[in-house]
Image: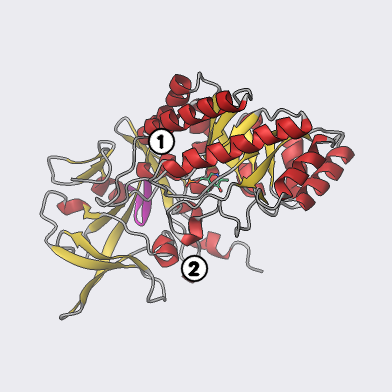
Amino acid sequence: MFVSDNLGINSDGNLTVGGVDTVKLAEKYGTPLYVMDEQVIRNSLRQFHDSMNQYYSGNGEVHFASKAFSCMEMCRIVADEGDGLDVVSIGELYTAYKAGFPMGKVGFHGNNKTNEELRLAIEYGVGHIIVDNISELHRLEAIAAEMNAVPHIMFRIKPGIDAHTHDFVKTGQIDSKFGFALETGEAFEAVKEAVNCKNVKLYGLHCHIGSQIFDIAPFEEAAKVMLGFISEIKNKLGFEIEGLNLGGGFGIKYTGKDDPSPFETYIKRVSAVVKSECDRLGIKLPKMFIEPGRSIAGPAGITLYTVGARKEIPNIRTYVSVDGGMADNPRYILYGSEYDAIVANKASEERSEKVTIAGKCCESGDLIGENMPLQHAESGDIIAVCATGAYNYSMSSNYNRLQKPAVVFVNNGQSRIVVKRETLDDIIKKDI
Ligand SMILES: *Cc1c(COP(=O)(O)O)cnc(C)c1O
């Protein structure tokens, strides 16, 4: 009935998340409100690392991709589960550091890192820096020499895999701003240089082929291409790569149309490919890293809104306007993403109409979705939009000078604030 198993209906006919009444959450904390189910986050992390233990002899690390949802409490939960983090900016790095995250389990990404970011990553002792391009390698080496450090690095490689997903979230093909190309020899030249660098230690190779990918085959293909390259490096340079980072990108269920494979299946199949390729090529099994973001945070979250205006345009459409929109969820305006929505205080009623849910920003494109099956929604009702845990809060803005919503975690029937709602004074705080 719902896209996530953690949603239900209680005896008042209200939607529940992790057993907690969403209408009561809206009353208590106000709307718009991001609500995350802590158990869903923990279970998803466990599914990934348990499968790595089962199918890859535990020779792996799961790094949650912060960019999907980053705040200090999230870092603490990931740390508590014994997993690692992928960070992509000084802000995500600082968040992890301030949350007391074990920095040895952090991978630092980015296609255009600043010197300040590189310095801080070395100072904090991150596990590895994923170097994106040759000028970064040169800058990093100089900075590391200055700091008397030898950071471990991975190279980000474009494996040339075409994953079937939206163009904006495809990253593994040759025309991408991320990483070194294999076909042109660029990646090999970089490896050759890094092997002789005194102030960096080449530890591994990384690839990330895209996001919201349902097929497992592109991940298997990417693994094969990467292992082929590892073998080439061994044969030509006598150098053994120790770590293979296969990135994230596992798809989740946003609507009934989506049918993702269990995370376990990805890990099982990719592990099998890695093992057989290593055998075939005569190379040692690398330590495997994966970086799921959306698949950890996405299904855990819902967003609650209060309905304001309802506008019926005969023979055209009905707009149901809510007190948030593209400022807290820009995914429709960016990608035309689809979501499932429920009138939380009428959750047991039939979804009798199809409406356009509109936000309150001054943009016609500011929609949560079109043609959404919904219970009859009227002013004052609470609407829950599902699977908003990833790339919503982390992509939110203050457009139209809207305040960013609070983030609440639910667990064991309890709720707690983990990010406070912005105040009006927060809005003008940096104005002179
Ligand atoms: C975005 C990104 C991820 C996470 O992708 P998801 O689709 O959220 O799983 C992992 N690694 C890198 C390098 C990324 O850029």
Which residue does the image show at 34% across and 54% down from the upper left?
Answer: 30
Q: Is mark 2 within 8 Å of ligand 1?
A: no
Q: How many marks?
A: 2
Res 289 seen here? yes
Tell me how far mark 2 sits from mark 1, CA to CA.
29 Å
Tell me if residue 34 is in the magenta stretch.
Answer: yes
Q: Report the amino acid beneath label 2.
A: Tyr
Q: Nearer the viewer, residue 258 or 26?
A: 258
Which residue does the image show at 52% across and 49% down from the upper left?
Answer: 161
Q: Is mark 1 within 8 Å of ligand 1?
A: no
Which residue does the numbered mark 2 point to in the structure image? 399
Tell me if residue 311 is in the magenta stretch.
Answer: no
Which residue does the numbered mark 1 point to in the structure image? 41
Of the numbered discs 2 and 1, the one sitting upstream in the chain is 1
Image position, residue 389 (x, y; %): 40, 47
Q: Report the amino acid beneath label 1.
A: Ile
Q: Secondary structure at mark 1?
A: helix
Image depth: mark 2 or mark 1 in front: 1
Rendered-image quadrant of the C terminus = bottom right
The residue at the far bottom in this view is 314
Image position, residue 160 (x, y; %): 57, 50
The reply, left or right, for residue 96 in relation to residue 404 is right
Q: Which mark is residue 249?
A: none
Res 247 seen here? no
The magenta region covers 28-35
Q: Nearer the viewer, residue 206 or 319?
A: 206
Image position, residue 52 (x, y; %): 47, 25
Rendered-image quadrant of the N terminus = top left
The 10 Å Cα crowd at callout 2, few under 14, some 14 to 19, many 20 or more, is few
